[in-house]
Amino acid sequence: MKSSGEATWSVGEVAERFGMPTHVLRHWESEGLLEPDRDTGGRRRYGRDDITRVAAIRRQKDAGMSLEQIRVLLDADAPRRHAVLQEHLSDLDRRAEEIRIAREMTEHAYSCRAHDLSTCPGFQAHVADLVAAFDAPDAEVTRR
């Protein structure tokens, strides 16, 4: 157990302050991402280092990282750290481009006079890449 002078928080207190259900913290613990101390009654007690680790996991999750990627980043001996970060940077670049396109499309729709956006030539330009998949002679048909 950590030194008695250090402030600690229960799983409920930590979850509440981070705005998440307690089962998320328990899941992260079961995945090996957290190791809070236990009091004499066996209850989890989170110290300052644990809080910082929860904050790091939360931010990485908010950034779109998987628990597996986060596990690598939190492992001081992980040889794949830079590969995971490069993969995530590429994913962020892809998502940023998708957001840029979505914003342009939404701005156009906002100012468009057409009542049915699918008939608007300007809007059609924003979906042309998706529609083009149907113009290829060997286009695969997907049924739902």
Image: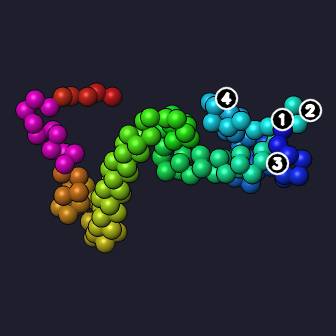
- Label 3 Cα crowd, 10 Å radius (few <14 / some 14-19 / many 20+): some
For the record, the magenta segment spans: 129-139
Q: Are marks 2 and 3 in contact (CB under 8 Å)?
A: no
Instruction: Decide whether residue 100 is among the magenta residues.
Output: no
Which residue is label 1 attached to? 38
Q: Are marks 2 and 1 in contact (CB under 8 Å)?
A: yes
Using residue 2 as the reference point, say whether residue 52 is left or right of it.
left
Number of numbered tags placed on the structure image: 4
Q: Are marks 2 and 4 in contact (CB under 8 Å)?
A: no
Q: Amino acid at mark 4?
A: Ser
In space, the residues marked 2 and 1 are separated at their CA atoms by: 7 Å
Helix, strand or loop at disc 1?
Answer: strand
Using residue 27 as the reference point, say whether residue 73 is left or right of it.
left
Helix, strand or loop at disc 3?
Answer: loop
Which residue is label 3 attached to? 9
Q: Position of residue 39 (x, y in %)?
A: 88, 36
In space, the residues marked 1 and 4 are separated at their CA atoms by: 15 Å
Q: Residue at x 59, y 46 (%)?
A: 57
Instruction: Decide whether residue 130 is among the magenta residues.
Output: yes
- Label 4 Cα crowd, 10 Å radius (few <14 / some 14-19 / many 20+): few
